[in-house]
């Protein structure tokens, strides 16, 4: 019996390439851009 240790980051059934990204880092960069606060809401945080 052969045991294979495999580590993957799952995004569901699609690969990064299927989602239009070349790597996990590229996807995370785009997510961080989308999750930034908009300037008009920033005044409430200060």
Image (cartoon, helix red, strand yellow):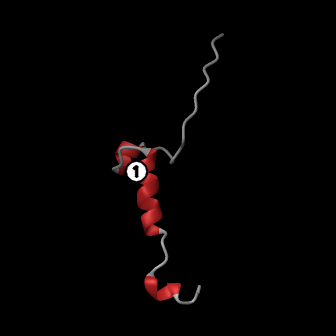
Relative image position of residue 42 (x, y in whole percent):
51, 84
42, above or below 27, in the image: below
Relative image position of residue 12 (x, y in whole percent):
51, 47
Relative image position of residue 4 (x, y in whole percent):
60, 20
Q: Residue furthest top?
A: 1
Residue drawn at 37 percent across, 50 percent down: 19
27, above or below 31, in the image: above
Count of numbered circles in the view: 1
Residue drawn at 33 percent across, 50 percent down: 20
Around disc 1, counting alpha carbons within 10 Å, would you say few (fewer than 14), some (14 to 19), or many (20 or more)?
A: few
Q: Residue furthest left?
A: 20
**Quadrant where the C terminus is found in the figure:** bottom right
Quadrant of the rendered structure where residue 29 is? Answer: bottom left
Q: Which residue is nearer to you in this view: 30 or 17?
A: 30
Residue that carries the numbered disc 1 in the rendered image? 26
Residue drawn at 50 percent across, 86 percent down: 41
Relative image position of residue 21 (x, y in whole percent):
36, 48
Q: Is residue 21 left or right of residue 42?
A: left
Residue drawn at 53 percent across, 43 percent down: 10
What element does badge 1 sit on?
Answer: helix
Quadrant of the rendered structure where residue 7 is? Answer: top right
Q: Is residue 44 left or right of residue 28?
A: right
Q: Which residue is nearer to you in this view: 31 or 12?
A: 31
Quadrant of the rendered structure where residue 9 is? Answer: top right
**Quadrant where the N terminus is found in the figure:** top right
């Amino acid at each position: 019996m052969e045991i294979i240790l495999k580590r993957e980051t799952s995004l569901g059934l699609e690969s990064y390439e299927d989602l239009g990204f070349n790597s996990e880092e590229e996807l995370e960069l785009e997510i961080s851009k989308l999750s930034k606060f908009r300037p008009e809401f920033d005044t409430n945080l200060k």
